[in-house]
Amino acid sequence: MRIQWCALGGMHIAIGITGCVVAVVAAFFLWASLHELSHYIAIKRYRSNAKGEFFLYPHRHEGRFLWARVSWEFEGVELSPTELAWVSFAPRWPDLVGVIGTTVLALALGWSWWALWLVILLGGSFFDLLIGSLGVNAESDLQRASRGWGISPWALRVPGLTLTLLLMTLTTYGLAAGV
């Protein structure tokens, strides 16, 4: 009886870990899609005739490694620096919804494999917001937005990193509280 319980427990863990790996891969594609789609929606707001092409997979472009990207073309006047800043900042909105939603979900559900899978899937927003808040590369969304608005990158970096770390801590607490 005890051996059978251990085998079932091991199988439960294996299914849970496999589900987590699948959730990580799905989270990448979900958040890459949301990130690039938010850029595209923002550009369409300023230039309704814009046409976009999505590359939702890791690749090299013009000698740089990119996780994903969207390219667009439109006829008419180029974007102003402020418009380009808003287009660059656009992925922050779904990220904020994702990190707040993930934290609330973790605090409400506590620990279970289902909760962990959902937190991983939605938690891709943490990764996107965290990496986006670093803005180390001169062509990053954060750097473009700060240039367009004429502000220091730190004015965007500090709130993004602070919010990410605070909500990651609360999410971890929510999952751990149920253990």
Image (cartoon, helix red, strand yellow):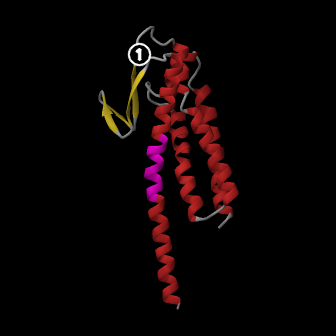
Residue picked out by circle 1: 74
Q: From the viewer's perspective, is residue 6 above or below residue 159?
A: below
Q: Position of residue 79 (x, y in %)?
A: 48, 13
Disc 1 crowd rating (10 Å Cα; few below 14, some 14-19, many 20+) is: some
The foreground one among 149 and 36 is 36
Q: For the residue marked with disc 1, what is the amino acid?
A: Phe
Element type at mark 1: loop
x and y percentages locating residue 133 in the rendered image: 55, 34
Please say whether residue 30 is one of the residues in the magenta stretch. Answer: yes
Q: Nearer the viewer, residue 50 or 131?
A: 50
Q: Report x, y in % for residue 29.
A: 44, 44
> Can you name the residue that lies furthest to the top here?
77
- 57, above or below 11, in the image: above
What segment is highlighted magenta in the picture?
21-31
Question: Which of the 4 quarters of the picture holds residue 164?
Answer: top right
Residue shown at 45%/70% (left/top)? 14
